[in-house]
Image: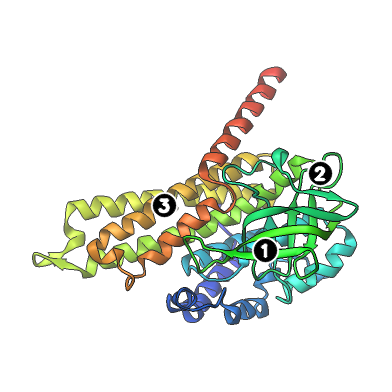
Amino acid sequence: MNFDFSEEMLQLRDQARRFLTDRCPTSVPRRILDTAEPYAADLWQSMAEMGWLGAAIPEDYGGVGLGRLAVCVLAEELGRAVAPVPFSSSVYLATEAILQFGSDAQKDEWLPRLAGGEVIGTFAMAERAGAAVPDRLAATVAGGRLTGTKLAVPDGDIADFAIVAVNGGSGAWLYLVDLKGPGVTRETVTTIDPTRSHAKLTFSGAAAEPLPGSTGAATVRTLLDYAAVPMAFEQVGCAQAALDMANAYAKERFAFGRPIGSFQAIKHRVADMYIQVELARSNAYYGAWAVNSGSPELPIAASVARIAACDAGWFVTKENIQVHGGMGFTWQMDCQLYYRRSKLLALALGSAREWKRRLIAELRARNTTETAAA
């Protein structure tokens, strides 16, 4: 079985890499770190003009119809560039939720605007510290009005609307809320990576429109599974950039009259980094196959992709700092950009520990089914 991307997808990857190399050098995320800008609006608009925001949106709704594999390809390059844009919130989650669970009217209204960059969407789920479990959500909707609080919502301070997860019982579990409407309070919160803004959202009787296809807690988990795969690609891209940075530095930094990369301790360190990246990439490709084919293995594929990507992101970006030695910890070095982003992405859809629990539960369920069938 060939898990590699098609020629069309490889051309998209090369185009995206050239574009981001030119338009998003590390000075761009540093600009967001050093100023009050919540995201790179100029870069976001350019991405919209290139059709990236509508990559998975069918042409009938104003997108380019390249499918979910294109989103994975773009995600990896955005991770490599540590791009300070709300792509994951708006594309992996908000757009995906409307595509899968929205009504025809909701698709007609929101998808063309998402594809064109006219609006930014996000996804709000977590309500307290610890694991965000759909069955334990406290946010409620009564009479079309949402009440509750969501913590650390990615891009919640800049998004135009949010897909909000609630415990809907026998009704809808996902609701669309206009964040600029009455009954919504936003409070910006600080995270380890200020290049991706977050906010606390408080809903006090805010108008909420149900996504009619979102019935049951499994709906929320399905959305997270679909988002976990491109998120894993973004983490792989970030880890790959850190590996490239460490490798380049090991070749150009001299100590005792020779490149530090010639020393066994550095060789082994970089080799371990490479292994982690390739392991994460192979699992991400498995996830991409499951997403693209609609395979029932998606919950398992998404879990292993997420776990491997979290492990690789943390390990490689940490080791990149170690390869750079004392300089790696300074503000002047770019090592911090990759470390910050990897730590943030590792918590974006729930920690690796939560995904390990999900994987164990899925494997047990599958084994039980196979045993019963035998």
Amino acid beneath label 3: Trp
Q: Earlier in the sequence, mark 2 or mark 3?
A: 2
Question: Label 3, label 1: how many angstroms apart (C-alpha)?
Answer: 24 Å
Question: Label 1, label 2: how many angstroms apart (C-alpha)?
Answer: 24 Å
Give the residue at the far left of this rendering.
256
Nearest-to-viewer mark from 1 and 2: 2
Q: Which of marks 3 and 1 is nearer the N terminus?
A: 1
**Number of dots carrying numbers:** 3
Task: Say whether residue 174 is left or right of residue 86.
Answer: right
Q: Which of marks 1 and 2 is nearer the N terminus?
A: 1
Q: How crowded is mark 3: few (under 14 residues within 10 Å), some or many (20 or more)?
A: many
Residue 314 image label: 3
Question: Label 2, label 3: how many angstroms apart (C-alpha)?
Answer: 35 Å
Residue 168 image label: 2
Are the residues at dot 3 and dot 1 in contact (C-beta closer than 8 Å)?
A: no
Amino acid beneath label 2: Gly
Amino acid beneath label 1: Val
Quarter holding residue 122: bottom right
Task: Say whether residue 196 is left or right of residue 106.
Answer: left
In this rendering, the answer to whether 165 lies above or below 216 is below
Write down the residue under mark 1.
Answer: 91
Q: Could you tell me residue 287's position as x and y percent?
A: 59, 48
The quarter of the rendered structure image containing the C terminus is: top right
